[in-house]
């Protein structure tokens, strides 16, 4: 059973639709008891880091997520809140990953970074996932030792990260057609 946390992201229904298509059992979760009894957590996210963090605090889920030992998949802002800090509204985040999420600052770029872009996976478990994925982000995480895939938009940035049981993707697998479903199947198969 997968718990999908309703943390205020506008892509919740898209994630549900993708998970339904994969025939994976899930429940929508808004409390820590649901989290404890699940095999994995998904933190979907479209929106602002500050709002997502506030919703997690209001639902008393911050410690439950940080202490969770099974896999956690953060999508878009769900990934960004894994870091210590986001420049988006100067938000203190979960602090699972070191560093801060930064705003794209290149004036030659159209912000937000929206549409299809190439993701290069550097982890052999996901080697069949290379391809184009859908993005919708104005903020990014830099490449570091936890990076499993990268994407270029003005500069290279981290598009898939892993630390311990926490996985984050900057792209939206639920909106990325066949490649997105391949990624999600791969993720669930590796649980």
Image (cartoon, grey):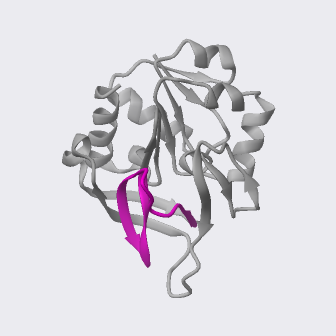
Would you identify the image quadrant in which residue 86 lies?
bottom right
Question: What is the quadrant of the N terminus in the image?
Answer: top left
Q: Nearer the viewer, residue 164 or 105?
A: 164
The magenta segment is 138-160
- The residue lying at 37 percent from left, 22 percent from top is 24
Location of residue 39 in the rendering, given as x and y in whole percent from the top left corner: 46, 18
Question: What is the quadrant of the C terminus in the image?
Answer: top left
Location of residue 82 in the rendering, given as x and y in whole percent from the top left corner: 59, 45
- In the displayed structure, 31 sits above or below 100; it is above
* Residue 152 visible to an observer of this rendering: yes
- The residue lying at 70 percent from left, 28 percent from top is 63
Location of residue 103 in the rendering, given as x and y in whole percent from the top left corner: 61, 70
Would you identify the image quadrant in which residue 54 lies?
top right
- In the displayed structure, 17 sits above or below 152; it is above
- The residue lying at 19 percent from left, 46 percent from top is 128
Location of residue 115 in the rendering, given as x and y in whole percent from the top left corner: 42, 65
Q: For the view shown, which residue lies furthest in the left direction? A: 128
- The residue lying at 27 percent from left, 47 percent from top is 123
Q: For the view shown, which residue lies furthest in the bottom direction? A: 108
Figure disc tally: 0
In reply to whether residue 147 is colored magenta, the answer given is yes
In reply to whether residue 18 is colored magenta, the answer given is no
Give the overall secondary structure of the magenta segment. Answer: strand
- In the displayed structure, 36 sits above or below 77; it is above
């Amino acid at each position: 059973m997968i718990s999908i946390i309703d943390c205020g992201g506008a892509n919740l229904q898209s994630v549900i639709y993708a998970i339904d298509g994969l025939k994976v059992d899930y429940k929508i979760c808004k409390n820590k008891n649901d989290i404890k009894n699940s095999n994995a957590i998904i933190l979907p996210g479209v929106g602002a880091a500050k709002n997502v963090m506030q919703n997690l605090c209001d639902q008393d889920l911050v410690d439950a997520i940080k202490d969770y030992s099974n896999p956690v998949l953060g999508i878009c802002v769900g990934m960004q809140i894994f870091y210590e800090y986001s420049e988006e509204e100067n938000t203190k985040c979960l602090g699972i990953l070191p560093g801060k999420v930064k705003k794209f600052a290149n004036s030659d770029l159209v912000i937000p970074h929206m549409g299809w872009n190439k993701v290069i996976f550097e982890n052999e478990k996901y080697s069949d996932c290379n391809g184009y994925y859908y993005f919708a982000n104005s903020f990014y995480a830099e490449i570091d030792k936890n990076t499993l895939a990268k994407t270029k938009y003005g500069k290279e940035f981290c598009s898939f990260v892993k630390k311990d049981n926490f996985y984050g993707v900057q792209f939206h697998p639920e909106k990325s057609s066949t490649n997105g479903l391949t990624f999600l199947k791969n993720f669930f198969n590796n649980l």
